[in-house]
Amino acid sequence: MAQTNKTKPEAVNPTSEARVEEEEVAYLSKRHRVSSAIVQEIIRRTGTSERSAVEREIRKGMARR
């Protein structure tokens, strides 16, 4: 028997989600002293904006320098 979700999905405001993403990019770029464009490129390349995954990629890139 398949279980279905009977609750309505919450409406997500795209502008507030974009603002959170911008704040996250700004935080990570400031913390790791890289440009926000680098952080955005890492997010695009990895396909996730999960903080730990992005920080791992930043550290891998810095280790190469």
Image: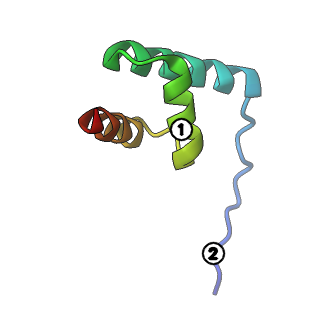
Residue 11 relative to residue 56: left or right: right
Mark 1: which amino acid?
Ile
Residue 20 relative to residue 28: left or right: right
x and y percent of residue 43 in the render? 54, 38
> Dot 2 surroundings within 10 Å: few (below 14), some, or many (20 or more)?
few
> Dot 1 surroundings within 10 Å: few (below 14), some, or many (20 or more)?
some
The residue identified by callout 2 is 3
- How is this picture coloured? rainbow
x and y percent of residue 51 in the render? 40, 35
x and y percent of residue 32 in the render? 33, 20
The residue identified by callout 1 is 43
Residue 18 relative to residue 59: left or right: right
Nearest the viewer among 58 and 64 is 64
Residue in the image at 70% along x and 53% along y: 7
Furthest residue in direction left, as rendered: 63
x and y percent of residue 28 in the render? 41, 21
Question: Where is the N terminus found, in terms of image quarters?
Answer: bottom right
Q: Which mark is residue 10?
A: none
Residue 46 relative to residue 30: left or right: right
Tell me how many marks there are.
2
Disc 1 + disc 2, Cβ < 8 Å: no
Q: Secondary structure at mark 2?
A: loop
Mark 2: which amino acid?
Gln
Furthest residue in direction bottom, as rendered: 1
Which of the 4 quarters of the picture holds residue 62?
top left
Spatial separation of the CA atoms under disc 1 and disc 2: 33 Å
Residue in the image at 28% along x and 39% along y: 64
- Tell me if residue 6 comes above or below residue 56 in the rendering: below
Q: Nearer the viewer, mark 1 or mark 2?
A: 1
